[in-house]
Amino acid sequence: MLGAGDVDNMDPNISYYSIGYLALRPWSRQLFTYPATPDHTTDAVPDLATELPTTDNGGVSQDGLTYTITLRPDAMWNTSPARPVTARDVVRGIKRTCNPALPFGGLPDYEDLIKGFQSFCDGYAKVGTSAKEIANYAENNDIAGVQAKDDHTVVFTLTHPAAYFVDMLTMPAFSPAPKEYDQYVPGSSDLAQHTISDGPYQVESYSPTKKIVYTRNPAWKASSDPVRKAYVDKIVVDETVTQDSTQQQLQTGTASADMEFDNFPPPSQLPGLLSKKDPNLTIGPTASSNPYLVFNTASPNNDGALGKAQVRQALSYAIDRASLIQVLGGKAVNAPLSRVLPTSIVGGETPFDLYPFDTAKATSMLKDAGADGMTVKILYRNSSEGSTKVFQTVQQELSKAGVKVEGVTSPNADFYTKYLQVPSVARRGVWDMAIAGWGADWYGNAALSFFNPLFSGEPSFPPVGSNFGLYSSEATNALIKQAESAKTQDEAAQLWAKADKQVMTDAAFFPITNPQQANYHASQVHNTVYVPAIQNYDPTNVWLSPDKQGD
């Protein structure tokens, strides 16, 4: 597998990035997951769990507040000797997600949903950040809504019914954690060198930004895993290959090139690949806003101009979405998105556009706001052709409205971890706009996974959320609270639509597209089923032609 960047984290309870999820797939398992099964890749299925909980089988209580989940008895950690994955490991993993050193970025999804979790996390925030202090707090404090009933039964208690809860449990944040992880600070480089596997592969070696090597896990039993087939003996991820070189090697049959890692086909090559109907190209659906432009509302630059909604609205009028879609590969793979929610997500069914392209209006509004002639710094990943072309296009268009644009470049591996997930970087004005991306944490009834992590005010500020621009609105927050506790899906959809309109009225960000994801593989790779959750083919379910078994 060839890539140009690294994972965000090798800690399953902390990783919050599609490439991180891809890297976890071979060696980390969840209670439920999305399978590499054609036409069912967004249907949650049991992974470590024995079955999907329902009211009929007793897994869900009649009031919808209690979920009882039984673990497979033959799922094993690759410890010495190997031992079973237990319900206590599940509880430990969930506790780790709100640790004070490096919390999981999607906490707003479930912090208020699981009974007692908010108070547990509030106490955790006051603890020191050494491995011993973190482990001691977790060991001596319980979460009322997450209990190990016995070795193989975990019980969740919710604060309100949530039909999406099983889908939420597909997130790697809910992965079990072995007791050995208490020796390390969550998300640390030390832990990344001491991973423990319950999947078909184990991490043989990890050299950050350079290489990941996976080999067979001798403790894994095929009978325990209905999702991963583990056809290949070894997976090698080379993180030093450019996007163009990756595509060239995959197309020319290079022995050491089978699949992409974090590199996708360059947008400029997509029209050609599509026109010749290249059989090795896959165009798969997403439920995402990727890329989008986020405004840093806390930037001190230009006398804090981006803190004004009128300035953000003006900049939105100055950007031509159609031009951005063109440089990203065209409409064939990029459906225009002018709001928060894609149409496939409940609440996003009715499109609207508050900011049709209008340079004259943008120029006038900037002048009225006293922000004409402002300079904007845009953060982007310069190893990505798409990100670079979006930056260049926005730079050209904003210049027509009298706005000067400067680029702030970042390697893929640093973009989130050293820039967007660090609020002090935003508050210092290191960047004013950033070219980021977002995808649903689960599918269908998933509006919550857009609004809570991205737009719910201070509770969603990094690192516990992904509100990178530090946007806050009492009106939006109130609508989110109403929507997440709505009694019916129809009622929720109406409230999510109102929240969507409020976020866009405030111009918290500039959406561009809900894209289809392009992936490319070499001819020797078979059973390439695209899985939206990892934005790639599942590397544990592909096999190679007999005459090309790697290099």
Image (cartoon, rainbow, N blue to C red):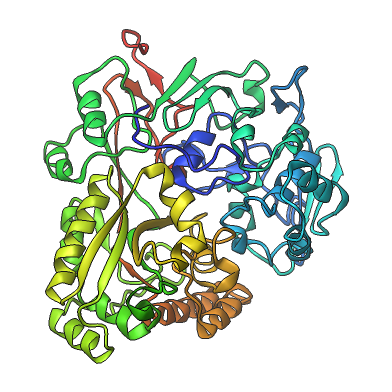
Say which quarter of the image contains residue 460.
bottom right
Q: Residue at x 20, y 46 (%)?
A: 267
Total marks drawn? 0
Viewer can see residue 446: no
Q: Nearer the viewer, residue 142 or 433?
A: 433
Q: Nearer the viewer, residue 187 or 506?
A: 187
Residue 298 pos. (x, y %):
44, 73
Q: Residue at x 78, y 36 (%)?
A: 86
Residue 46 pos. (x, y %):
63, 40
Viewer can see residue 521: yes
Q: Is residue 388 above or below residue 309?
A: above
Q: Is residue 456 left or right of residue 287?
A: right
Q: Residue at x 38, y 30 (%)?
A: 239
Say which quarter of the image contains residue 345.
bottom left
Q: Is residue 485 above or below residue 45?
A: below
Quadrant into which the N terminus falls: top left
Q: Is residue 445 above or below residue 500?
A: above
Of all residues, the one furthest to the bottom in this rendering is: 368
Q: Is residue 418 left or right of residue 530?
A: right
Residue 225 pos. (x, y %):
62, 29
Residue 200 pos. (x, y %):
58, 23
Q: Residue at x 21, y 34 (%)?
A: 244
Q: Is residue 43 left or right of residue 364?
A: right
Quadrant into which the C terminus falls: top left
